[in-house]
Amino acid sequence: MTVGLFIPCYIDQFYPNAAIATLTLLKKLGVDVVYPTKQTCCGQPMANSGFEHLTQGCNDLFIENFSEFDYVVSPSGSCVLHIKDHLHAEKAEDKALGIRKKIYELTEFLTDVLKVEKLTASFPHKVGVHQSCHGQRGLMLAQMTELVEAPFSKPLHLLNMVQGLELIDLKRPDECCGFGGTFCVAEEAVSVKMGKDRVADHLNGGAEYITAADMSCLMHMEGILRRQNSNVKVIHIAEILNAQEF
Amino acid sequence: MSTGAKDHAQLSDIFNKDEARVDWHDETLWFVRAKRDKAAHSLPEWETLRETASQIKDNVLSNMHEYLLQFEANAEKNGIKVHWAANGEEHNKIVHSILKENGVNRIVKSKSMLTEECHLNDYLHKNDIEVIDTDLGERIVQLAEEPPSHIVLPCIHKKKEEIGELFHKHLGTLEGASDPVYLTAAARDHLREKFITRKAAITGVNFAVAETGEFVVCTNEGNADMGAHLADVHIACMGIEKLLPLRKHLSVFLRILTRSATGQPITTYSSHFKKPRPGQTMHIVLVDNGRTTQLGREDFRNSLKCIRCAACMNTCPVYRRSGGHSYHTAIAGPIGSILAPNLDMKNYADLPFASTLCGSCSNVCPVKINIHEQLYKWRQVIVKEGYADPKKAIAMKAMDFTLSNPTIYKFAGKAGRFVLKHAPFTVNNKLNLWYKHREMPEPPKQSFGEWYKQNNKND
């Protein structure tokens, strides 16, 4: 089994540690991982802004980079959902469809494909889990509070294997952080207010770290935390699942 | 509603100037969402009910013409006069002509979002007909000369102290009084006189049953019943999508409507109107106003399944923090944002973008409308039809250029990080909307791509 590692553009540029942790973790679990070096972006920023018709360049590049692998794995629920829902190519639609079926967000790959039941990670801190909307409601990484269905959570299933980690309770366990791609600047006032409210919920719960399966939400919340001079940090879930702090 | 040329983002910006008020608005509506959750979770069959309701409405949308004719025939058989209106203007004219025929120039009206959509009050006012809204929330916003900010809770944006001031000015309550019991009693006295003296009453319609020709009006205050029972002329205004094929289907819809709306098991009054009582005349105005156009849009047709419960507004993290008026249309929130562009794409081009696409709206929708997916699809339509901001189009083309080419992307990334690190003042300023209330990410020494190249030479 060979896995193609898809590292979204903003993680590549701003959060290399999340990517390094993802790669290291997959290797630790015995997976043969390859990072195609000519990758850029999934095209979501354009598509969500109404410019899906401009994403063909990104689509073609994505197909070129990833069609050969058995699986494509990425530490970003939002980008994975975009590929799953919108990857098209007139000239290579079968390849596009193939990728849409074999792309996984990291925690769902660990839970559903590798069926991980044990990790050697240790992270002795109070952690708040942010349920990123596209991962949770789009990829169904966890049950949603709106639905009358049995509870489950792939990220929590994994975090519960981490030694010393203490999960904090939130008043609103799955409310959006307000990032929303270009929404964060196009609707600046509401975006910031949503982010402040989400951060406050974690702070009131006593979190030392806020984690998520999506770095973009964390980037948004980090921007607010740092403006508030808070000591609370954001950390991608891969970094926790890979942590060896004692 | 006229808001000048301000769009959702600008109106939200104004709303957010008073953060304490935003917190209050958010908490108030979250409380309603929480009540909805409790009500939904008390029924193990909840998801089955949603699916059933959704399928019944799918059937209605696919056979609308037949059900409409069946409804018309049965309603007329029952002695109800049925009128057809192609748009809001026709609807308003029909209502006006009925009132004129009956020599009525003062009427009562219970809640009807359709009449808000058609701007009936303005039209009748211009024709010297006085309309008194009898739903308490609607009466409050009417006194304030504002449109409703929410389709179920029209004055949810007002605090009780503000209502006290309005009542003091208009109804003569004591200055400074804000006790809800006292204020409600004053409204009750005020409205009682209107109910008794007005000869015509307008109501909305929640459900119209094709099988029987009857219609159902749901209220908590009983004001629709008070109006209709006391008036000589009852005019019910309904959008053509309000149909249900069979009476038994009400057993699904009456169970989900109010649980979704306010968390109550059922509305206090779910009144069935089937025929006029002796001496009364009863009219139904069936209104299209863009609905058949929407029915013809494959990606958006099932927005017509909406039963106007407002669950999507109460759960929407944007709506709760921007207020209903920021949507500058009769039906606010996520559902309004997929309905309004159908009526006027240019004027409402901003609304599908007033969302993070979090998807909570689709999850609470009792008839399973894929609201957030339709928001995404409307964005594509609006851009293609040329209603997007030209500045945004230029930025998107530049983004496409950069991201379609790995070499340019790597260069741009490196240049961007260099700028952030060595010349942060170029982005950390008020022209950068991110920076207004958020710090920029700290630029790392190297990108993951660069790190990978260094550390995986043998790969």
Image: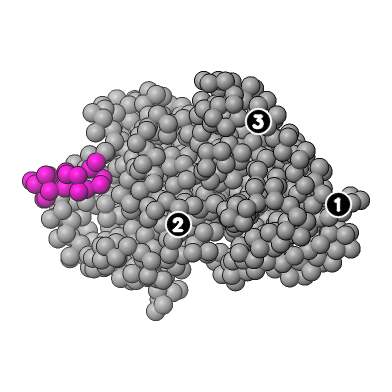
Q: Is residue B1 visible?
A: yes
- Report the Cα–Cα distance between label 2 and label 3: 37 Å
Residue B96, quarter of the rendered image? bottom right
Residue B45 or residue A123, whichever sits in front: B45
Q: Residues within 10 Å of mark 3 (few under 14, many from 20)?
A: some
Q: Amino acid at mark 1?
A: Gln
Which amino acid type is shown beneath numbered disc 3? Ala
User: Is residue A220 placed above or below B330 in the rendered structure?
Assistant: above
Residue placed furthest toward the bottom:
A91
Q: Position of residue B285 (x, y in %)?
A: 72, 60
Label 3 sits on residue: B187
Check disc 1 and report the residue beneath it: B280
The earlier-in-sequence mark between 1 and 2 is 1
Mark 1 is surrounded, within 10 Å at the Cα level, by few (under 14), some (14 to 19) or many (20 or more) other residues, namely some
Label 2's element?
helix
Q: Which residue is mark 2?
A: B352
Provide the secondary structure element on which disc 1 rests. Answer: loop
**Chain under numbered label 3:** B
- Residue A106 appears in the picture as rendered: no
Image quadrant of residue B12? top left
Image position of B55 (left or right of B362): right
Q: Which residues are magenta?
A: B418-436
Residue at 12% x, 44% y is B424
